[in-house]
Amino acid sequence: MGSITLQDTQPSGVYGTPPAELAETPEGALQFSPLIPGSRRLEEQEEGALGTMVVLAPHGTVERRYTIALALRALAPDGALTVLAPKDKGGSRIAKELKAFGCDVAETSRRHHRICACTRPALPAGLDQALAEGGPRLDDGLGLWTWPGIFSWNRIDPGSALLEQTLPALSGRGADFGCGLGILARTILTSPKVEHLAMIDIDRRAVDMAGRNIDDPRAELRWADIRSGTGLKGLDFAVMNPPFHDGGAEDQSLGQAFIRRAAEALRPGGVLWLVANRHLPYEAVLKSLFKRVTPKVEASGYKIYEAVK
């Protein structure tokens, strides 16, 4: 009979969707990615509760160090940690970052990824600093609660700013698809004729921060993947600054999926307001789903459309 190890007796965790051929995720591992709706919160995981953890590391330095620190805190001493990422998206820095936490790292390269394996030291170094740097904070410049890793977390996205300036006073029931921190929702809800606003985002951190930034009983926050459907029907309006990157690579189908979900959710005569980078080809899908599509503004590399169902 083989000996029972720590990894056999404690649950395993995974952050994101690491390629199976690069890092084996134990069966039944608990998912902790804030970008996968329904996942658990790594911030709330009991310290030392996990036997193993596999992390597909985020691209941003502050977010990545924060995530690794959370993973180390959640692992039991000598718990196994694997962290990987594409070389050009933070992978080349992982070993150095793990060593700064006091880890003894074994590093390999495969399929343009760096894969680092280590065990949790008894007393990891620098966790508190990494957790403080990567956690939620009130940004004085924005006047909003934000969190590193959220889209446009430390600045107002220029596309959203342009749409914010262009939107008319809306009315009735509507939705903010990809609500982020609540920049557009804040403007939409200044209209007293708005009855209800569904704010939807795939990033749980964005939903959490939007909940702090928008104090209005008409707002309803949802952590969901819009591509999978919204369940909304009969809306009077929808607004969006849809994403067009997935895992760092441009993916125009994301915005097209957002447009289709908006068309499904709007009533006949309902209106979609959309901002997009000028080069993105959304006109064809808009014209196939909406009765009238009107370009409203084109400036600073962005374009805004009003589309009536």
Image (cartoon, rainbow, N blue to C red):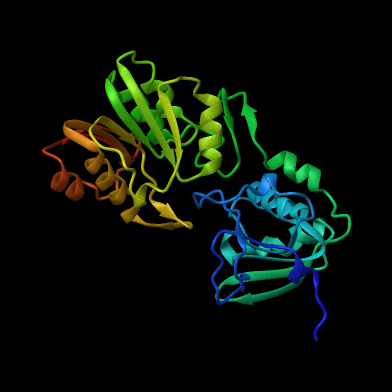
Q: State left or right for residue 143 relative to residue 170.
A: right
Name the residue rendered at 72%, 73% in the picture.
107
Percent position of residue 99, x then y: 80, 61
Q: State left or right for residue 107 relative to residue 3.
A: left
Name the residue rendered at 38%, 16% in the picture.
190
Name the residue rendered at 84%, 55% in the picture.
124
Residue extending farthest to the right is: 122
Quadrant of the drawing holding the C terminus: top left
Quarter-of-image position of residue 233: top left
Residue extending farthest to the top is: 192
Percent position of residue 187, x then y: 39, 21
Quarter-of-image position of residue 80: bottom right
Residue extending farthest to the front is: 1
Percent position of residue 122, x then y: 88, 59
Q: Is residue 53 above or below residue 285?
A: below
Percent position of residue 240, x then y: 34, 37
Quadrant of the drawing holding the N terminus: bottom right
Please name whichever residue, 240 or 296, is drawn nearer the observer in this view of the structure: 240
Quarter-of-image position of residue 253: bottom left
Please name whichever residue, 108 or 231, is drawn nearer the observer in this view of the structure: 231
Please name whichever residue, 61 or 3, is drawn nearer the observer in this view of the structure: 3
Q: Is residue 43 above or below residue 296?
A: below
Name the residue rendered at 50%, 20% in the picture.
215
